[in-house]
Amino acid sequence: MNFLTNILYWVSMAFLMPVVVFLIVSFIGSLLMLGSFYGIYLGRLKFREEIGQVLLDLKEIGESEFKLPNLSGHSRFAASLNEAGRAQWRSVHTDKILADFELKGEKELESSKILIRVGPMLGLMGTLIPLGPALVALASGNMTAMAVNMQVAFSTTVIGVFCGAVGFVTHLVKKRWFIEDLNNLQYLFDLARSGVENDKKTILV
């Protein structure tokens, strides 16, 4: 029995170094994600202003005079609009463009989803693994070794929770932005198609 428990102990201890390395990588990734998130936020401030003006103008002029808006604050949104315009707003093409837009949005959210789950998991592993040596050190009266192991345990917990928090916040806000963009894109596509159909009816009459 002691042989088996010793194997489990050494296997778990072998995971400590990879866990610490992955936690450091996750921490660096979360900092980069925060920087990228701030850049996207600044771009969205400009985009929100532009798309708000476009939607306001469309309510005033009506769907019959729909023109492709000039948007610079959100390149992917603008690219989808331009692609739909080149396809003459046909539903078979706009549906595919919307599906591609949704797919790219989900892909952007994947990094946040991974951080939400992996960060706390690594933090928990980094907390539990050093507790064994810490208890052994406590039993033998080696307070220095116990303090070192407890320091590792608490540090990994903090880093893991921080990574998970960054992933959760960025995922939450990005998902709201993504749904908002998808709704606006769908609205503009429907509006453009209605304008094209009205023009065709006018020509036929």
Image (spheres, rainbow, N blue to C red):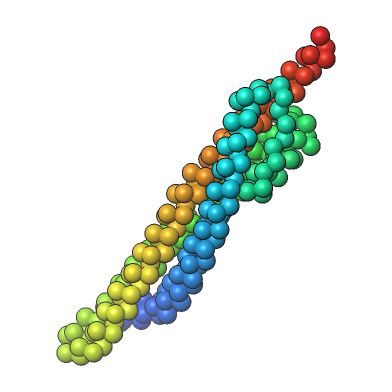
Pick the residue in front: 173 or 17.
173
> Where residue 172 appears, x then y in whole percent?
44, 49
Could you say where residue 11 lies in the image, as x and y percent from the top left? 38, 78
- Taking the image as shown, residue 10 lies to the left or right of residue 136, namely right
Residue that sits furthest to the top in the current view = 205
Residue 155: tell me if it is visible: yes
Q: On the image, which quarter does residue 86 sit in?
A: top right
**Camera sees residue 182:** no
Left or right side of 90 for 10: left
x and y percentages locating residue 27 in the rendered image: 45, 70
The relative height of residue 65 versus residue 108 in the rendered view (above or below) is above
Q: Is 64 in front, or is 179?
A: 64
Counting every numbered tag in the picture gives 0
Identify which residue is drawn at 67% across, 34% down.
95
Horizontal and vertical percent position of residue 154: 29, 74
Residue 145's image quarter? bottom left
